[in-house]
Structures are given as structure tokens and as C-alpha cells.
Amino acid sequence: MDSFHSFNQHAFNQHAFNQHAFNKHAKTYHLFAHIQQQIAICLVQFLKQKHYAKVLDLGSGSGAVFNALERQNILIEDFIALDNSINMLKLHPTQSINIQKISLEHADFEEHVFCTYDLVVSSSSLQWARDLKSVLEKIALSSKEAALAIHTDFSLHEVHEFLGTPSPLR
């Protein structure tokens, strides 16, 4: 399948953008995110299907979930990678053998207008939500299937050390 690539820049929350510093450290983040990459692989291994029409990856970063989907040969018609860091999205893959259309959306997932999805995936991202309950409600109402990995304060030590940030978690 030929991949189609589009890039939509949406309004985003500047405070959250600066707070997490992912934009600044995008090019070297993968060197320190070994656990996050393994979690994405595990999430994808437990998916129920091998074909999805529409998939949303919340907090997609540079493409850990995308790469895991590729490895598992999961076919996707429309893949939306949504992230609050423009520089992380610049590193996200834009071509695939198994994914027909790839859209990169620069947006805050808390402000994203959810459509209907066959699958919503979020690997190592939702812990940054200011209102996790609201985001989870949106996911539940908009998706047929969800695969989520949410960290606790202690599981993010590696990320905070790299970014030089305190944990927003309680």
C-alpha cells in the first residue's frame, strides 16, 4: 500500500508544550526512552485485531506505537499520530507498507475533538493529562477498542531525569 502523509497543525496548549520539554529534547529522547519503547511493543502485542480502519495514537511522539504496529504487520487504513511536540512529530515515520494514510496532528490531546475510532492507543503519554478522567471518558465514548499504558510517579524517573523536570503526578 502506498502511504499518504498529511500534516495538520492545530491549536495547542503552550504551557504544556514548554512544561514537558519534549520539543527541546526530541532528537535524543529515543536514547533514554527504552522502557517506553518496550511498553509500546507490549501494548500492540495484545491488540484483538490485525486490521483497523481508523486508529488514533495519543501522545504519539516519534512513533514508538507506529513502529510496533509495523512489526506486528497490523493493517490500518487511517492512522492519526497526535502529539503536543512539533519536534517529536517531525521524527515520526510518514511512510508504511501496512498503513495506508498517515496524518500527523500537532495538538494537545486534552483539547482534541474526538471522532469515532476503531482503536485509540496511548503509550506512556496520558500521565501528562491535567484532567485524566475527562480524557478517559472521551476515549471510552469514541473508540471501539483502547490500548493504554499510564505511568505512575515512580515509573517516570527515567523521563524526569532526562528532561530535568519534576513529576506532575501526585
Image (tube, rainbow, N blue to C red):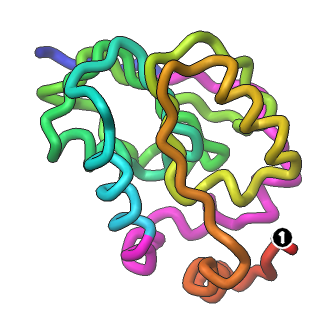
How many numbered discs? 1
Q: Secondary structure at mark 1?
A: loop
Depth check, front residue: 35 or 133: 133
Is residue 20 rendered magenta in the image? yes
Q: Residue at x 67, y 84 (%)?
A: 154
Give the main secondary structure, helix, strand or loop, of the magenta stretch.
helix
Q: Residues within 10 Å of mark 1 (few under 14, many from 20)?
A: some
Q: Which region of the structure is painted magenta?
A: 7-35
Q: What amino acid is at disc 1?
A: Pro
Q: Residue at x 66, y 29 (%)?
A: 139
Q: Considering only vertical position in the picture, is 53 above or below 82?
A: above
* Residue 157 pos. (x, y %): 62, 86
The residue where tag 1 is placed is: 168
Q: Considering only vertical position in the picture, is 111 above or below 100?
A: below
Residue 87 visible = yes
User: Left or right: where does residue 23 sit relative to residue 95?
Assistant: right
Which image quadrant: the C terminus?
A: bottom right
